Amino acid sequence: MTPVFLTFVLVLSIFLGFELISKVPSTLHTPLMSGSNAISGVTLVGAIASFHLNQSAFGIILGTAAVCLATINVVGGYVVTDRMLGMFKKKVGGEK
Amino acid sequence: MDLSIIINFSYIISAALFIFGLKMLSSPATARKGNTLSAIGMLLAIIAALVSQGIDYKWIALGMAAGGVIGFFAARLVAMTAMPEMVAIFNGFGGAASLLLAWFEYSGKYQGNDLAPVFTAIVLVLSIFIGGMTFSGSMIAWGKLSEKISGKPYLFSGQHIVNIIIIATALGLSVLFAMNPGEGNFYLLILIAVALVFGVMSVIPIGGADMPVVIALLNSYSGIAACAAGFVIHNNILIVAGALVGASGIILTNIMCKAMNRSLANVLFSGFGAVTVSGAGGQVDQGEVRPATAEDVYYILEAADSVAFVPGYGLAVAQAQHQVRELGEILEKNGTDVQYAIHPVAGRMPGHMNVLLAEANVPYDQLIEMDDINPNMETVDVVVVIGANDVVNPAALEDESSPIYGMPIIEVHRAKTVIVLKRSMSPGFAGIQNALFFNDNTRMFFGDAKASITGLIAEFKGS
């Protein structure tokens, strides 16, 4: 993939991101931040795809550490966001 | 069909799921499903990556197992009051992961040869620098938030010059590296060290009260770092997801800045949070405050048709959210309309107060945003301000000489009656006297917030 194509993807994503996030109410800003922690753990996908066989010992340390830290973000981010959003309830007994 | 096409196609679906997930976060009713959708997108992308040929499953499995266990337990065990620390640390891990990935890619693929084009060299340097500063900056932010290190702004003369020197050094190293990436390992190592120092330098001058802005900004950096790492390994899902997170962090930073009356430049060039209080506050008239007892407040609340609570940082400190909810329920049973008006910077991070109240079982339809309650403020019978001060200070609207002039506030002074729960008459964070306390329609209810509200609940139950 060429740099130009990747930059194209980047620019569109940024616009889309601004569009989407500006619609999130301030009530949900904390879950938004923990949720975006999880999404930034996407580095995990890159680390897996790049973890080819026959790495040097040093490479293995770097790669495994990257996988581990990114997994913490992905798992921790989604689980804590789910836990938080589960607390947001509508009025009990209120008309549905 | 080529395997890489299937993998890339899966990435596109993942990206779509992330986008839908964020879209559903626009309402508390759909937010939880949105998060699940986003998680499914991530799972799909991970599976797609695992299908790649010739990857080393042994180490990947080890890293994922360790990270999964740590992440899961951290997320289950963290207290809701400690969410800012959690987000700060996750920001740091995100940055570190991107740094490590870029470094890993370099050491395995480009070191010792001349395969890396200039473009790759540039994005390598970017992801390493941004990732490094995000990591060390986040660790300092975490230390400040968890009070492991002092929340006081740490300033010394010539700080800006030191920062300029650091940036110049980083630029110089980047150029040296980009000229011959294959032999540039040495420069890269120094660059990592410089990035770590820069992260520390950019967060230490910022005071504890301004941490909401900083973690929002670091959140953005962690996304940008992931994005840059995506360019290094030519992976578009990293670019899309990183850009979404980067945009999210920037918007939150902007909202926080507006709500705290600071410019983004003020944040980026540090040194803020140390704004010394000028003589502006505390002069002129003021007059007398009208203190109230628990009994007085009870009669006022008992007779009210609509009550709005305005919780602030003080409420979280006093851990009084459960008592407030209990009082709210008693009032509702009494036929009173109860709302919670929440300022964007209430709590210790964006939206934190909403989470704390949700945890205390306050239904989200009672959580009202500042911009939604202000137009209707005249119709509110009683506003109960708990542990908030600057965010209800009318000086922000009226007094041009006030340091908080221009900051958006919850305009409680326009309500029929205001009850302020406060420990004493001492001014708030910004050190500014609040004219609200001296208004004719304001009653001061002095004491510890938790004890005061418990006292009120007792009054209601005793009657």
Image (tube, coloured by chain):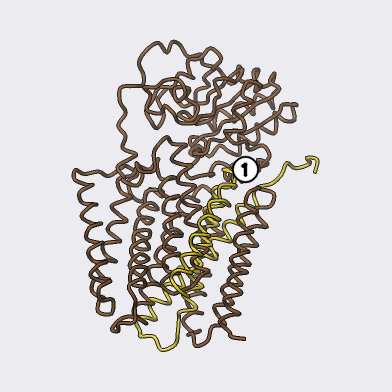
Tell me the kind of residue under disc 1.
Answer: Ala
**Looking at the colours in the rendered structure, which chain would you say is drawn in yellow?**
A
Which residue is at 24% across, 52% downward?
Answer: B163
Badge 1 is on which residue?
B360
Residue B220 appears left or right of A17: left
Q: Chain of mark 1?
A: B
Q: Residue at x 49, y 72 (%)?
A: B235
- The answer to whether B190 appears left or right of B412 in the picture is left
Q: Quadrant of residue B34?
A: bottom right
In percent of the image, x 46 and y 72: which residue is there? A68
For the N terminus of chain B, give its image quadrant.
Answer: bottom right
Q: Is B289 placed left or right of B43 in the picture? A: left
SS label for mark 1: loop
Question: How would you rate the neighbour count of disc 1 (Cα within 10 Å): few for under 14, some for 14-19, many for 20 or more?
Answer: some
| Picture quarter with the C terminus of chain B | top right
Image hue for chain B: brown
* Figure check: B199 above or below B362: below
In front of the other: A1 or B136: A1
